[in-house]
Image (cartoon, rainbow, N blue to C red):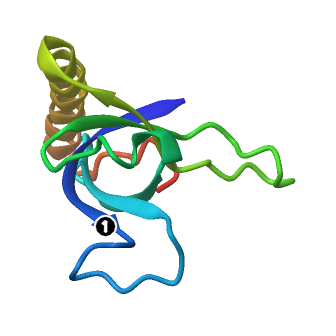
């Protein structure tokens, strides 16, 4: 399972305004369901990721844990029309769920571990 998000900020170990205990890179994302979360960026994408991009986060279970724990790693950067289509499809679905829940006086159910 993967979830799209829009990059708000990239946090690199070598950045002037970041003190880091390691060399990893994280990115804070505005997720399709209005959550704001920070994830590790795959080493292969660290040099390419930028604010404003649409990315996919790996939510598959990490096999090194007995209980299912999501991997939580940014593994793809999507651009162009494809990025807009993915983002808008997820956001539209979330808005429909939100309106439906509001009509019956409930909060929309969170659809993933986050």
Instruction: Determine the secondary structure under disc 1.
Output: strand
Residue 42 seen anywhere in this rendered image of the structure: no
Residue 22 drawn above or below residue 39? below
Towards the viewer: 59 or 110: 59
Taking 11 as reference, is 20 left or right? Answer: right
Q: Residue furthest right?
A: 66
Taking 87 as reference, is 76 left or right? Answer: right
- Tell me what residue is drawn at x 21 percent, y 14 percent: 82
Towards the viewer: 38 or 102: 38
Q: Position of residue 34 (x, y in %)?
A: 21, 51
Q: Number of numbered discs present?
A: 1
Q: Position of residue 64 (x, y in %)?
A: 83, 51
- Tell me what residue is drawn at x 80 percent, y 44 percent: 63
Q: Position of residue 56 (x, y in %)?
A: 38, 34
Residue 46 drawn above or below residue 10? above
Residue 56 seen anywhere in this rendered image of the structure: yes
- Tell me what residue is drawn at x 21 percent, y 42 percent: 104
Q: Which residue is mark 1?
A: 11
């Amino acid at each position: 399972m993967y979830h799209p998000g829009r990059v708000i900020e990239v946090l690199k170990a070598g950045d002037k305004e970041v003190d880091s205990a390691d060399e990893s890179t994280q990115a804070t994302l505005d997720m399709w369901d209005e959550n704001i979360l920070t994830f590790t960026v795959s080493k292969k994408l660290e040099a390419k990721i930028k604010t404003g991009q649409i990315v996919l986060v790996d939510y598959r279970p990490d096999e090194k844990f007995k209980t299912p724990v999501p991997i939580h790693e940014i593994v793809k950067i999507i651009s162009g029309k494809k990025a807009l289509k993915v983002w808008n499809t997820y956001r539209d679905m979330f808005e429909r769920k939100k309106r439906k829940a509001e009509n019956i006086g409930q909060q929309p159910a969170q659809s993933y571990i986050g």
